[in-house]
Amino acid sequence: DTEVTQTPKHLVMGMTNKKSLKCEQHMGHRAMYWYKQKAKKPPELMFVYSYEKLSINESVPSRFSPECPNSSLLNLHLHALQPEDSALYLCASSQDVGLRYEQYFGPGTRLTVT
Amino acid sequence: AQKVTQAQTEISVVEKEDVTLDCVYETRDTTYYLFWYKQPPSGELVFLIRRNSFDEQNEISGRYSWNFQKSTSSFNFTITASQVVDSAVYFCALSEGRDDKIIFGKGTRLHILP
């Protein structure tokens, strides 16, 4: 099973709302990632978790708060977002962190902030 | 300077034609990995291939083939006898150094016309 699942598929939220994105993998991977992708752009890395610990935060605003409750699950908590945060949010996992490991991506959550 | 350059922003070909997507990369490391990902309209990035810097053998997988040339820092991707289902955005990516990151090119949008 090489599947990464993400819920919800679509999310519309107001600027004062609090919502969460969920990502799950059952491949035994020890690294998990959040990316943000704007239209017609490549994915931009936001966070990396390695063995359930945050290893990389790409200077992401604090209105995005990641959480890794266990090795299979990755959440992204959203609060007080701006309309420019509207994008496709992709989760990925890899066997481990490091050069050689390919990342497997989920289908993404398409977020619209109104 | 861009680390991964995909000079072709958009390509359209008629079904059954062959098409080559170009990728030029830049790195000072001797150990690095190159990847190709496909992103169909559904949004999910699909891993296609990984190649390490010590393995210059070309690879063929069905209608897909990859030409890795260190002398020109290129890792080109050819689809033979293209099909409508090949329509997608294709990203070339580089993993190098001590970072646990993949650097994506800007992508090439491929349209296969029936």
Image (tube, grey):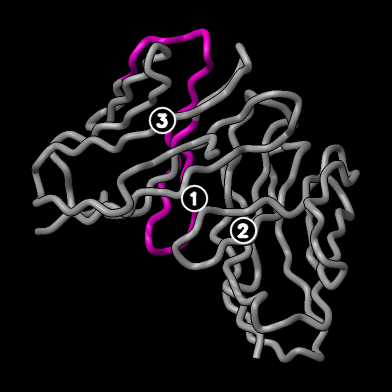
| Crowd tier of the residue under label 2, counting other residues whose Cα lies within 10 Å: few below 14, some 14–19, many 20 or above | many
Q: Which residue is mark 2?
A: A90
Looking at the image, which residue sits at the far front? Answer: B1
Could you tell me residue A85's position as x and y percent?
Answer: 67, 75
Element type at mark 3: strand
The mark found on residue B45 in the picture is 1
Q: Which residue is mark 3?
A: B24
Residue type highlighted by circle 1: Leu
Could you tell me residue A81's position as x and y percent?
Answer: 76, 80
- Closest to the camera, between mark 3 and mark 1, is 3
Q: Determine which quarter of the picture holds residue B30.
A: top right
Q: Nearer the viewer, residue A94 or B78?
A: B78
| Crowd tier of the residue under label 1, counting other residues whose Cα lies within 10 Å: few below 14, some 14–19, many 20 or above | many
| Crowd tier of the residue under label 3, counting other residues whose Cα lies within 10 Å: few below 14, some 14–19, many 20 or above | many
Query: From which residue to which does the magenta span run?
Result: B35-59
| B50 relative to A87 in the view: left or right | left
Q: In which chain is the residue bearing label 1?
A: B
Element type at mark 1: loop
Could you tell me residue B110's position as x and y percent?
Answer: 27, 52
Residue type highlighted by circle 3: Val
Q: CA distance from mark 2 to mark 3?
A: 25 Å
User: Do marks 2 and 1 both belong to one polypeptide chain?
Assistant: no
In the rendered image, the vertical position of residue A42 relative to residue A89, given as above or below: above
Residue type highlighted by circle 2: Leu
Q: Determine which quarter of the picture holds residue B66.
A: top left
Q: In which chain is the residue bearing label 2?
A: A
- Closest to the camera, between mark 2 and mark 3, is 3
- Residues tagged 2 and 1 counted as in contact (Cβ below 8 A): yes
In the rendered image, the vertical position of residue B21 relative to residue B49, given as above or below: below
In the rendered image, the vertical position of residue B7 relative to residue B77, given as above or below: below
